[in-house]
Structure formats: C-alpha cells, structure tokens
Image (cartoon, rainbow, N blue to C red):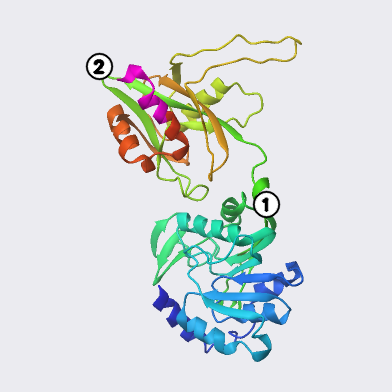
Amino acid sequence: MINAWDKLHNRYKGEDWIDKPNIFAEEVIKYLKKDSNILELGAGQGQDSRCFAENGFNVISSDISKEALKINKEKVSVKLKDKVKVIELDMTEQLPFNDNQFDVVYAHLSFHYFDSKKTKQILNEIYRVLKDGGLLIMLNNSTADPEYGIGEKIEKDYFLIKDKNKRFFSVNTLRDVVKYQFNTILLDDLGETYKDSVKGVHNLIRFVGSKIPRNDLFQTALPFTGGIIERTLGNGDVELLLQTRWKPEKDPVYSGTFEFPAGVLDKGYENIYDTLKREIFEETGLRLKCIKNDSQTKKFSPKGDDSSFGFKPFCQVQQLKNGKPWIGSIFICEVEGGVPTSQKSEAKDVKWMKREVVRKMFEENPEKLFTLELPAWDYYFNMNSSLD
C-alpha cells in the first residue's frame, strides 16, 4: 500500500493543480477559529497544510508516504517553517499526541481506505486528540462515485480497486459513523476536487463536525432487555439460541460476536415484557412462550391514571466502559416451536447451539461473545446450581 502511495505522488508531481489548495480546504477555512492548531491526516504533498499556515494557523502535516513527505518538506517555504511541521504518521496506529491537543483534525480524502473496525478505531483516536468542541473536517468518497462497486467487495461499501482498498460513504452512512461523537455542522454530497472534476465527479461527501465532550456523549444510561433462550431436547440435552451480532457500520468492535436477542426500551411506557417479546420475534422470528422463574407484582394505580409494577429478572448487566452505557434486565426464556430465522439486518446466523459448547466458549474464548452479555453468562453457567 505504501508503494502505491509513493507511485501516486510521483504521478501527481506533474499535475497543474498539485500546488493549489484543494477546493474543500478553501471552503472550510471559514469554520476555523483564530490560532487553531490543526492536525492534517494524509496530507499528501501538503498544499492544504500550507494554505492553512498562510492563513495564520499552526499545522502538523502528516502522511505515510515517504515520497509525499519528501515533496511536502521541500515545498514548505522559509516563511512557513514555524507554522508547518511535516511528520511521518500511520493513521491506523495510535496517534502520537496527547488527549485534547488539537483544535482541528483535517482529512482530505484520507479517511475512506479502511474496514469498518479500523475506521471506528481511527475515529476514536481523532476524538481523543481533539479538544472539546474541536472540529473534525473531512472529505470522503461517495457511493455515487463511478468506481463504487468496481473491484473485489470486502464488505459493505468497501472494495479492493486495483492496488487500494476504498470505502464509499453516503450522507446517511457517514452520519451513522460519526453521530455519537460529533455534532454535525456540515454534511452533504456536494464536495469536489480538481482531479475528480475532470472525470465528472462532483458528489464527494463533505463533513464538518464538533467534538461532543465525553461527559455529554450520553446524558443517561440506555435501558434494554434480553433473553437467554433455552430448549430441552428429548434426550435431555439443552440448547441455547444465539445469533451473530452484525452492525459493522454502527458497532464494528462487537460485530461478529455471538449474542442472545436483546433490544433497547425505546418506546415510552412499554411494558418490559412486551419489549422482550417484540425483540425476540423481530430478531429470530420466534414467539416467546414463557419466562422461567418469572416473578411480578400486581400493577399499582393509586391515583387512577398512573401505573407501576415490579419484576425480578434473572440478572441485570451494565456496560461500564466504551460501547454505550447500556444497563439491562436479562430473563431466561423458552420460545414456541419453529425454525429460527434472522429478521433484522443487525443480526444474522441465528441458530441453536449446545449449552456445553456455549459454556466452553465462555470459559475459553469469551472474546467471541458480546461483552455486555458476559455477566449474564457468568450467572447462568456459574451461579445457577440447577445447570450442574
């Protein structure tokens, strides 16, 4: 990949636009505050870094290509030496900067070369090094690009095209990627570059967003409910219903792990049991038959127009770090007969697995299970004496 970039920058040296600031850079200068410290990722030959420096900003201009870095350094004038620092940097690794160091992170056509998991990791690093309220400014490939769908498909919207892996965003998919960490200031598909305009491409994805302070990311916990679903075979063996969590754009870290059906209580005043029934059916196509050892109080309505009730789930679990601040009630359930079928795009490969297989996975390879649900499996396998 590095050699591919070196070849590209050798070719770009002869283009008449290579020393011009990119169109996008000139469009976004109006968003920058005076004396901003800017980190440019994938700066290439540095034309945008020099543009920002000429407008009074301090810039760290980074790239992974040695050829680009060489050219970039040669083009920094004596006048700009104190405003532009050119460094070699692999943006797929942890960024070598302090937390809250930059006012702006700028990425012109450099954020869209990675799989979903790596894209999220890069975004987390960008979030870390930005000051609260700092700006992420980037231009990305669009799913309307003529190259979209060409080459070998690696995952959704991500292809191997010639010698490079390329991701393509739409306005909606980029919004999903950034929405939990950045407030959107600008997001559209009206971006263009000099080199792409001659090919008729005028729909690159423009984004400007401000970092949401960590304390404000989630103002409240997210309540959910889920069910460990059992069935007992005629020979006495017990099987458990699991599915593969699959949210590569929204949750690449946990996508690919096994989970039991669960869902957020996102409908006001919906009875938690109704939520559980709904989620099991929506995710597996099966209907809830019963909840084992269910315990509920009667409903109380002392004012006549209010209502409350109590219940005892099998256990409760809470996410304490990263992910989202989930907190949920887990039940042990049985479902009516039928063949389980994945119903939602966010889960796949729903199937029955022998309980001892799941137990072995929990004990020997817990990383294969959804982290949020591990405490429920701990209770299930180690604290329920009826299983032994």
Viewer-side residue, 23 vs 320: 320
Q: Residues within 10 Å of mark 1 (few under 14, many from 20)?
A: some
Mark 2 residue element:
loop
Q: Position of residue 304 (x, y in %)?
A: 75, 10
Q: Position of residue 232 (x, y in %)?
A: 31, 19
Q: Magenta segment: does it hold 243?
A: no
Type of the residue with mark 1: Pro
For residue 262, side relative to residue 32 (left or right): left
Q: Provide the residue span drawn in magenta.
A: 377-388
The tag earlier along the polypeptide, 1 or 2, is 1
Q: Position of residue 167 (x, y in %)?
A: 48, 62
Mark 1 residue element:
loop
- Number of marks in picture: 2
* Residue at 62% over, 68% down: 106
Image quarter of the C terminus: top left
Q: Assess whether mark 2 and mark 1 are in contact (beta carbons under 8 angstroms).
A: no
Q: Which residue is mark 2?
A: 234
* Residue at 55% over, 84% down: 72
Q: Which residue is mark 1?
A: 213
